[in-house]
Image: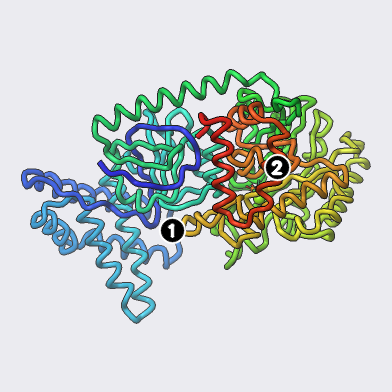
Amino acid sequence: MEVKKGIGVSPGIAIAKSVVIDSEEYRIPRRSIMSSQRKMEIKRVREAFLDAVAELSKLDEAQSIEERKIRDIFAVHMSFLRDRSLRKKITDLIYSECLTAEYAVSTTLREIATRIAQVKDAYISERAADIYDIERRLLKHLLGEKREDVAHLTEEVVVVAHQLSPTQTAGFNRTFVKGIATDVGGRTSHSAIVARSLGIPAVVAVEDVSAAVGAGDMVIIDGNRGVVVISPDDETVREYEQYLRDFERLEHELDAIRDKPAVTRDGTQVQMLGNIEFPDETQIVLAKGGQGIGLYRTEFLYLYNEQEPTESDHYEAYAEAVLAFTYRPVVIRTMDLGADKYTQSKRYTPEPNPCLGLRSIRLCLQDLSMFKTQLRAILRVSVLGDVKIMFPLITNLEELRHAKMILHDVMEDLDEESIPYKHDIEVGIMIETPSAALTAGTLARDVDFFSIGTNDLIQYTLAVDRGNERVATLFSAGEPAVLRLIRAVVQDAYRAKIGLHICGEMASEPEYIMLLLGMGVRTFSLAPPMIPEVKKIIRSVTITDCNQLTRKILTMNSRRQISNYLMDATRKIIPEVF
Ligand code: PEP
Ligand code: MG
């Protein structure tokens, strides 16, 4: 049994066998075998080589590859796979050291790759990538289904990977994928957000978990405490099964307040909205008592398809959400591609610093035809319910005005075509850059509402990558700089009499709820599974207490002091949420 610590990013407990997903960097753990098993392992190696050769020949025929270069690459792979001395090296290792076939293949090939990579001649050193490719191909045959993709699951599993993209996470079959653990990531990385939205327990930043877990190992994922237990003993499994039952009971109790209003003990009404990435998540929002959608992350429409979505793709996706919430708000955020919501390989020109690059609204303002297609669909769907438009990553007034100008152009086009839309549709912006927060008073004159995106606001204010586990401890909403910005934005929104939402992950962290209420936030938008817990906190406090707590917090200059104070205060009122 091995216990590893990481960051719990999506609550819940999962106990199941693992599927380890391939990634460039996976390593196979060193496992010994009994000497009686050596023959069997050597046979497995021979079969894997034969299968890999057969696969490669098929690939070569089927694709009728013309380019010499690609043919050459396959030829190199083939010659390696047919090289008897390579196979002998692997089988000798199994024989002399009693190791598994996977480990012997992986170490032998990696050793060769490392040596080749060190050769001064660039042509030769670049061949190291081919060796890794051959390693991957052989391991795929050795590990078979267990290391296959997770598209065809038939039993419950936990997924272990070095890293997952948001798109991979979103594609998981929720019936079978019960938990996730990755080597890297942070609380607000987008795959963590997706896991939370889907209600899949997840722990990220678990050092080397993908190397430590073997395919098919029993694994416990504790998303509440950020713990992963590999090959647990019977007693630990029993303890966790009990813990799981308790957790499910608490969830059940929370679900019981689904239809109760989100109102504080002294009568202040709060609006609870859901953040979604896909239209079918509206059902989870409804099931958890959400009163609408405060953030529809539409970029998943682009990430999921190879082709750019058409106007009707957009329309259909939005209509499904809007119709589920007739006459309740649905805030559709225009496409926020870029940073970790874009694979660099999908880009024509990979950027050295994508978080500060051509992302989000900047990309839209450069690709007007793509932007207008989306705006047309949002406007057309606006007649079906209470639809609002929101622009992400606004940094200054010119950018906002430019985006609004394009919106008006699209409105004129629709007028000319006599296509109906809501002429007075509300337009809002995300406040997620320090520049927008500092100039919120000015921006407020041009919009109907603000939505504070604390994930990016924290990232850009503290210069801490939201998805990088190495700096994860520096990423905190409790930093005085962040709190001052949030408070200023809330005050500017109040002064300008415009709407104010909060939609970053801070809105679902129990210790910040009283503080946000005390600052004046009355609309929370969060991952749907978290709605009942936050509602429970809201129903347990008074605004008078929240105001007092906020006054006290704003006098503090240290994050640690702030965090401790908030934890204690929240724990006193509702100990069960911790
Ligand atoms: C945010 O930045 O806080 C936010 C809600 O947007 P996203 O997480 O999609 O970047
Ligand atoms: Mg953001």
Say which residue label 2 marks. Answer: 502
Counting residues from the start of the chain, the first of labels 2 and 1 encountered is 1
* Horizontal arrangement in the rendering, residue 110 relative to residue 372 (left or right): left
- The residue nearer to you, when weighing 560 against 398, is 560
How far separated are the C-alphas under marks 2 and 1?
Answer: 53 Å
> Going 32% across and 53% down the picture, which residue do you hit?
137
Q: What secondary structure is marked by label 1?
A: loop
Q: Label 1 sits on what residue type?
A: Ile
Q: Tell me which residue sits at (77%, 39%) in the image.
A: 377
Q: How is the image coloured?
A: rainbow
**Which mark is on residue 26?**
none
Q: For mark 1, what is the residue?
A: 65
Which x, y percent locates residue 529? 57, 31
Quadrant location, the N terminus: top left
Q: Is residue 33 above or below residue 573?
A: below
Q: Is residue 516 left or right of residue 178?
A: right
For label 2, being within 8 Å of ligand 1 is answered no
Q: Is residue 578 above or below residue 38?
A: above
| Residue 445 at x, y percent in the picture | 89, 51
* Near-viewer residue (3 or 169): 3
Mark 2 residue type: Ile
> In this picture, is 311 found above or below 245?
below
Residue 383 lies, in percent from the top left, at 84, 31
Residue 240 in which image quadrant: top left
Q: Nearer the viewer, residue 193 or 365?
A: 193
In the picture as drawn, the residue positioned furthest to the bottom comes out as 120
Which residue: 63% across, 21% down?
Answer: 258
Q: Nearer the viewer, mark 2 or mark 1?
A: 2
Residue occupying the point 6% across, 44% down: 36
Q: Is 368 placed above or below 142 here? A: below
Along the line of sight, the residue nearer the viewer: 377 or 194: 194
Residue 40 is situated, as x and y percent measured from the top left of the image, at: 12, 44
